Image (cartoon, grey):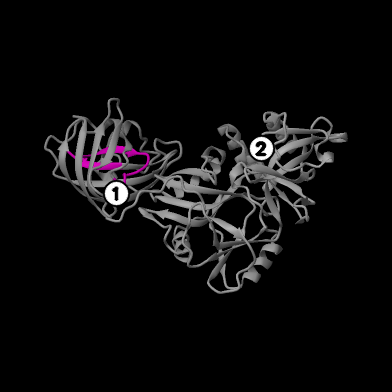
Amino acid sequence: MATLGEYRKKRNPARTTEPMPTKTKTKPKTKSEGNSFVVQEHHASSLHWDFRLERDGVLVSWAIPKGIPPDPKTNHLAVHVEDHPLEYANFEGTIAEGEYGGGKVIIWDRGTYETEKWTDREVKVVLHGRRVQGRFVLFQTRGKNWMIHRMDAPARPDWQPMPEHVRPMLATLGSLPKDDGWAFEMKWDGVRALIQVDGGRITITSRNDNDVTVSYPELRGLGEQLGSSLVLLDGEIVAFDADGRPSFGRLQQRMHVTSAPAARRLATTDPAVFLAFDLLYLDGRTLFDVPYQQRRELLLGLDIEGDHWQTPPAFEGSGSAAVQASKEQGLEGVVAKRLSSRYQPGRRSPDWVKVKNIRTQEVVIGGWSSGRGRRAGTIGALLLGLPDDGGLRYIGQVGTGFTQEILDDLHARLRKLERKTSPFTTEVPRADARDATWVTPRLVGEVAFTEWTGDGRLRHPSWRGLRPDKSVQEVTQES
């Protein structure tokens, strides 16, 4: 029989408040009749849940990185660890930093269980806890790892799995609604993102369904804060300047990063914040058909607040007051959302209306003209278009709003896309096309401008940055 020697060997009683058993060589010879179980949420170097079953005078234990699986469609890894003393079932507290398992321990669930099968490679039990009930099996794989599987249906008959590949709902450009029944959110100058939380781990996807989790390591703590909750959030990733205002230019440095070490460095120098404004799934319930007002109440109930994640307020009442507040804070505008509106993934709906203080337009880069003077040898201006009838309609050029760093980055990207012929299906003025270098239209950017001219060109455009979260097919003219 195994002993608790391994448990004692890994712990220093002078430095930890964990229970320390007396030094007996073996487990009790008489099998214990105890049938308790406990699940402890353990915020160690990596968040996990410790699952412990009372048997023969000890707690047989597994560390489960993503927690107890809520439905039978997903198995979770379960790492078999040393037996723990029975007293550990009541342990809550913080294990000192630097000690084995250092971090906060919370009792997540407890109760009793029935044994259906117990061998060295397979354990079948029926759990009767406050949060977890049902039949589960732990089984050893061909290697040393174990898995845990739920054998019966979820406790809730209406349980739904988390939806996959969700495209965010989009707003239409317009003016303030004149009727009642709307809420007003600030329009943040960032990039749209959906964050899935599963087993305390997050997955961040962009508006065009790209996994960008590696780009924003400072957001991982949101998963730990939500713990075992299964959640799908909609929101905006924003970077703030020294005055606390959103800076799209500063965020540009974060949006293209795919190297984990580089992302960690930038998370320190140019940190990002996730602003959650909608809740699409919560613990087995898809919320698409739930009215916006109720979704907001559920979102606020999650208490999402931290150094790098917040739930900004939504204002009911006067839309004009919200617009004025956005102007005073130097924000892009507001988004009006109908209180009764359902969430329509991937659709642009009149139930959400964006009211802008600054006119912006997404654009497709079709080429560039060479620079002169200080810009000799690089980009002088970008030649811009909009998708139109299967082609690219020319809408003008932009030559302001660039830093040298931005120009160098754009030049490197566009050189890889060079082509001999113009991608524009409408005429490009001779002056603009004289020394143009044409490119395959794959890069989407954004400009600020004053107005559209009568012939469909941008007046006084200024470059704001690339939009890797948008595809060419998504770009439309905002009227």
Q: Residues within 10 Å of mark 1 (few under 14, many from 20)?
A: few
Position of residue 201 in the picture relative to residue 240 (left or right): left
Residue most toward the left? 30
Residue 268 magenta-drawn?
A: no
Location of residue 75 in the rendering, given as x and y in whole percent from the top left corner: 31, 39
Of badges 2 and 1, the one in the foreground is 2
User: Can residue 174 be seen from the camera position used here?
Assistant: yes
Amino acid carrying label 2: it is: Pro
Q: Quadrant of the N terminus?
A: top left
Query: Which quadrant holds residue 141?
Result: top left
Picture quadrant where residue 471 is located:
top right
The answer to whether residue 65 is magenta is yes
Q: What percent of the width, then of the height, locates residue 342?
A: 46, 61
Q: Residue furthest top?
A: 143
Specify the quadrant that holds the C terminus: bottom right
Asked if 469 appears above or below 12 in the picture, the reply is below
Q: Which residues are magenta?
A: 51-71
Q: Residues within 10 Å of mark 2 (few under 14, many from 20)?
A: many
Q: Which residue is mark 1?
A: 90
The amino acid at mark 1 is Asn
27 up-or-down from 347: above or below: above
The image's mark for residue 441 is 2
